[in-house]
Image (cartoon, rainbow, N blue to C red):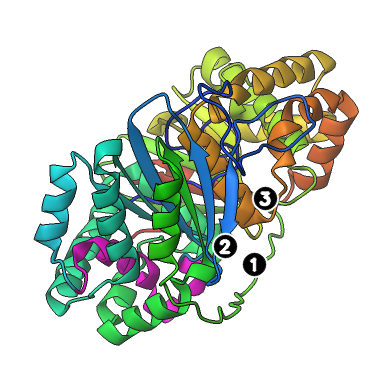
Amino acid sequence: MKMNKLVQTLTVPVVCMSLMACSSSSTKNTVPVPNGYAAPKGGSFKLQPFKEVVLENGLKVIYVRDMTLPRVSLTMLVKTGNMQEPESLAGLNAMTAYLLEQGTQTRDAMKIADEFGQMGSGVDVTPGSDVTTIYSDSLTSSQGKLLEVYSDLVMNPAFKDVEINRMRSQMVAGLKKKIDNPSSYADEQMDKFLFGEHPYGRDVNGTMEGLRDLRKQDIIKHYLTFYRPNNSTLAVVGQFDEAFEKQVQEIFGKWTKRTIPTVTSVAPPVIDGLKVKLIVKKGLQQTQIRVSQLGIERKDADFIPLRLSNEVLGGSFGSRLNQKVRDDLGLTYSIYSNFDVRKERGSFDISTFTKNETAAKALDETLKVLTNFADNGATEQEVVAARNQLIGQFPRAIETADRLAYNLLVLDFYGISYDYLTDYISNVNKIKQKDSNAAVKRHIDPKNFKVVIYGNESIVPQFKAYNPEVVRP
């Protein structure tokens, strides 16, 4: 079971403005293209052929054949996350997701683990803010068994009392342990400070209070409401034939659809000025620094220009933040910025850490670089370098069949045309200096940020000029 926060996927490299990937194939076909398989035409980048089928119950299935390795993978993207759970039951979606592999109507947790083990496989269930993914793979020789066990845990979970109580204990223990990891704790506190009561401000795994109040009927209701075929997309990747495709459709065609309710959430609080929260804890040897404001939705037209701009500011080793704060001043080993885009407006973040003695100086210099960039933008030379960087990284995002399939799942979820992939290189090449800088002007406001500082008690006097809110948990 993975209890980490799901990285919000985009489609290119790996960081927060990147695509979270899986694994397998190249754009060159090693066998003739099967009937029904095709790739979007046009564009400067050719994709491996794939096929989409929508079942009567609403489940969309994306097939990507890859004959280079004798394996098959299944990835289900369910369009539900902690966005669909009430605040009073925070952790409901994660609990529901983790319990899928803890028993079905005909298999207990031990039997599921044993059957996956015999295939040399396992299952990876990852709940997130917007989506939940369920992944597994096996050798082609075990594809029938893989499909049998995988579909059983997706469609027929048991939600047994003993497993609910055991999972509750594990999740509560995981939440308690987070405070021992200063970086993760600072990230979590920054989310709360930035998003307020919006679900993006909560840990994907919920709260101790929410987990305590969860009941079996809540889990069953959440599963029956949101874990539905007409709220999901399945990617099937690997070495398989038409018979296996029909088997997939026959099995998942039995999954019952329901009307999916629309869930709304409160808006994140408006940021007015520079707000600094200083969280102090005795014994910390370093200070964590987070600087954030609301960013953009994934569908924003400025997504690609902002990816390029972020490369210049803090998205690469040669970025301005890294050059100034790390290399020139020696205040940190690592500093980076990113746009964490999501279904709704995500965040724009800068993250770093430093010695307690230089905590305020590190924040001072970070804000100076940020303000200068927001006011003056990138130079022509920086834009050219960032453009080349993005284009050079792109093929890795879809170099395997699994990665291509995951990109297709994610683009489908966000309602973005697959042409995004075929046109990506040409669209990046079109970005001029004025386009990049105009996007920065529209979306980065250097006067309105929230800041979380997490460090030792001794750092408090350094931040007097910022008039911080001091918290001693």
SS at mark 1 in the image: loop
| Occupied quadrant, residue 213 | bottom left
* Alpha carbon separation for disc pair 1 and 3: 20 Å
Give above or below for 6 relative to 355.
Answer: below
Question: Mark 2 sits on what residue?
Answer: 195
Q: Is residue 449 above or below residue 57?
A: above
Visible in this render: residue 311?
Answer: yes
Real-space CA distance between mark 2 and mark 3, rounded to the nearest whole angstrom: 17 Å
How far across and how far down the image is residue 43, in percent? 78, 30
- The amino acid marked with disc number 2 is Phe
Q: Residue at x 51, y 32 (%)?
A: 14
The residue to which callout 1 is attached is 269
Q: Is residue 36 left or right of residue 460?
A: right
Q: Is residue 94 shown in magenta? A: yes
Quick check: can you spot residue 275? Answer: no
Magenta segment, which residues?
Answer: 82-105
Label 3 is placed on what type of residue? Arg
Q: Is residue 233 above or below residue 336?
A: below
Q: What is the x, y in percent for residue 468?
A: 54, 54
Residue on which disc 3 sits: 298
Does residue 331 appear to the left or right of 427 in the view shown?
A: left
Label the magenta part by its dominant secondary structure.
Answer: helix
Mark 3: secondary structure = loop
Residue at image position (44%, 40%) is 237
Residues at badges 1 and 2 in contact (C-beta under 8 Å)? yes
Mark 1: amino acid: Pro
CA gap, disc 1 and disc 2: 6 Å
Q: Earlier in the sequence, mark 1 or mark 3?
A: 1
In this view, 58 is above or below 343: below
Q: Nearer the viewer, residue 297 or 369?
A: 297
Please tell me which residue is depicted at 23% across the width and 65% down the height of the picture.
172
